[in-house]
Image (cartoon, rainbow, N blue to C red):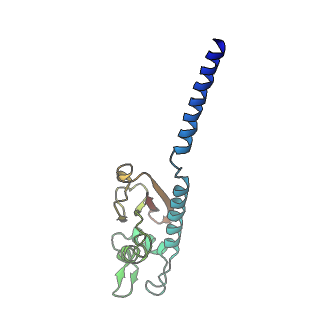
Amino acid sequence: MEIMGLAIVVILMAVAMLFVVGKMINRPQSDTRESYLDQEMAANMLNSLLKTSTDDDCRGADFTELFQDCAVNYPIGTIRCEPDSIPSCQYLRDRINNTILKNTTMRWQIPHRIVAWIEDKEDEPILELTYLDCSPDQIYISYDHLEAKLSPIPTSIGTLNIEFDICS
C-alpha cells in the first residue's frame, strides 16, 4: 500500500513537471530585442536629424541651429531658407516631414512622433509631427509600447527639448 502511494506521488510530480516545462516552452518570446532596436532607431534618427546640414539652403545652418532659431522666434523664425525665403520653422516642418521621415520611417511603415517644446511649456509644442497615430495617449490602445529619445538643446529662452518616439 505504501509503494502504491509513493507511485501516485511520483506520477503527480511528473505530470506537474511536464505542465511547467510545457508552459516554459510555449511562452511568447521576449520583446527585449524589438525594444532595443526601437530605442536605437529613435536615438539614431534624432541624432542624425539634429546634425543634418542644410548646405546653402539656410545660410549653412544645421537643424540644431534651425530648431534654436525657431524656438526663440516662434512661430516664424528669423533664419530664411532658399528657395522662396522660407522661415526656419516652416523649413523644419517641411524638410523633416516631407523629405527625411517620408524617405525613412514612413517608407518603412514605422509609427513615430517627433515633438519639440521649450521646457516648462510642454503643452505648447513648437513642432509636432505624428505618423500612424503614434502618441502617448495611444499606448496600450493601438500600440504595446513607446520608445523615446530626448535631446535637450540650450537656447536663450530656456531648454528646447526635442523628442523622437517610435511606437510598436
- Residue located at (50% from left, 67% from top): 46
Of residues 152 and 48, the one nearer the viewer is 48
Picture quadrant of residue 94: bottom left
Instruction: Say left or right for 8 vs 121.
Output: right
Picture quadrant of residue 85: bottom left
- Residue located at (43% from left, 86% from top): 57
Residue located farthest toward the top when viewing the structure as drawn: 1
User: Where's residue 51, x and y in %?
Assistant: 53, 74
User: Where's residue 54, x and y in %?
Assistant: 47, 82
User: Where's residue 1, x and y in %?
Assistant: 63, 11
**Total marks in image:** 0
User: Where's residue 27, x and y in %?
Assistant: 52, 44
Is 12 situated above or below 133? Answer: above
Of residues 80 and 14, the one nearer the viewer is 14
- Residue located at (37% from left, 57% from top): 135
Is 81 situated above or below 50? Answer: below
Of residues 27 and 115, the one nearer the viewer is 27
Which image quadrant: the C terminus? bottom left
- Residue located at (53% from left, 67% from top): 44
